Amino acid sequence: MYDIIVVGGGPAGMTAALYAARNGKSALVIEKNGFGGQITHSPRVENYPGTLSMSGNEFADRMLDQILAQGAQIEFETVTSVESLEDRKVVRTEEGSSFEGRTVILATGVRHRLLGLEGEEALIGEGISFCAVCDGDFYAGKTVCVAGGGNSALQEAILLAEKCKEVILLQDLPFFTGESTLQEVLFAKPNVRKYTNVKIDHLLIENDELRGVAVHIGEDQETSENNDLLEMHTFGQEADPSLHEIFCDGLFVAIGLIPENKPFTNLASLNEYGYFDSDENCMTRTPGIFVAGDCRSKHIRQLTTAVADGACAALAACRFINNQH
């Protein structure tokens, strides 16, 4: 039996394993895909304290080496359920394995909602990004598009507008759904263009690099902004008169995050958006079950907040174990 079983091998999960091991607890990390989580999509990480620059993959590799050196064990399997018994927790996987632990830390992370376009996944980190704080500096003085119209998209665009030559906001609904105050701030900036009721049809790719997007304009939404789009960014009419090209150096996709928490609703409450309803103490309604990282309810989802959660959850789990003896 392990002292602490961590479900998820992203920065939060690996930090939890690190703190568990350094506190003399046996730790197992179960990861279904690859260690590192979303940060591995970032070609350069330049906002992590104490490190001038590194790639997301480098960071993940260093963390993995670190927890293995501390004695943590790893398994590549997909967790399907966790059962909380009186004296132990039982973690079961899709592969048919079961593992027992005194405590469990759910660090299941999130995945970004994608546009579903051909070639999209191959360009993640190489033209397509999800985080202006992480990747905005790479597009300083360049033109970027932002897909989305909610608060997240508006906040991303505001940050990008401070650095980029031009920011083009593309919303597939007839209106922007983000807060009016954010819209006022963003649309007052002279280097921001906004288009509503436009749907990205496909990516413009040349030599495996993103060159722009081709969009459809809704027939009933020929606003002044969209008329501007018709005039300034016109696709070759002989190819498809309903499509219009927008050239850009980067595309930031901000159409939502998908937490992967549903298998654990028997243990921890979820908020209306599907995130674990827990604050910075990382505790749940089930004794011995903790949560950490982007999967929990929070305002800021960054590398630094993920590793902070991992430390908090691991130390809480250690206290729980110590109090049982």
Image: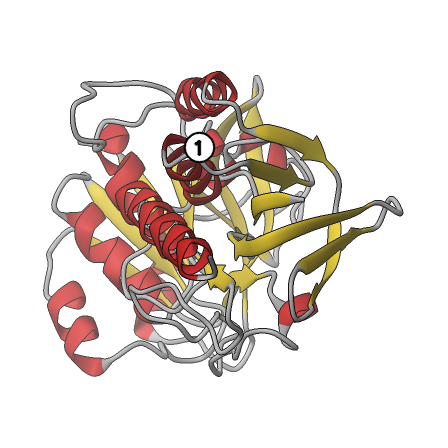
Q: Residues within 10 Å of mark 1 (few under 14, many from 20)?
A: many
Q: Using the image, determine if residue 261 lies above or below residue 303.
A: below
Residue 191, x across and y down, in percent? 16, 51
**Quick one: 126 or 208, which is closer to the camera?**
126
Snapshot quadrant of residue 150: bottom left
**Residue at the extreme front:** 325
Q: Is residue 273 left or right of residue 301?
A: right
Look at the numbered disc 1 and give the secondary structure of its residue: helix
Residue 133, x across and y down, in percent? 24, 43
Q: Using the image, determine if residue 276 lies above or below residue 141.
A: below
Q: Count the marks.
A: 1
Q: Using the image, determine if residue 82 lies above or below residue 55.
A: below
Snapshot quadrant of residue 157: bottom left
Q: Residue at x 56, y 31 (%)?
A: 35
Q: Is residue 51 left or right of residue 120?
A: left
Looking at the rendered image, the quarter that the N terminus falls into is: top right
Q: Is residue 84 left or right of residue 70?
A: right
Q: Residue at x 21, y 21 (%)?
A: 51
Q: Residue at x 42, y 24 (%)?
A: 63
**Quick one: 133 or 278, which is closer to the camera?**
278
**Quick one: 258 or 104, which is closer to the camera?**
104
Q: Is residue 313 left or right of residue 143?
A: right
Q: Is residue 7 visible?
A: no
Snapshot quadrant of residue 84: bottom right
Q: Is residue 28 visible?
A: yes
**Quick one: 290 or 222, which is closer to the camera?**
290
Residue 81, x across and y down, in percent? 74, 62
**Residue at the extreme right:** 96
* Residue type marked 1: Ala
Residue 185, x across and y down, in percent? 11, 68
Q: Residue at x 21, y 73 (%)?
A: 183
Which residue lies under the disc numbered 1?
Answer: 21
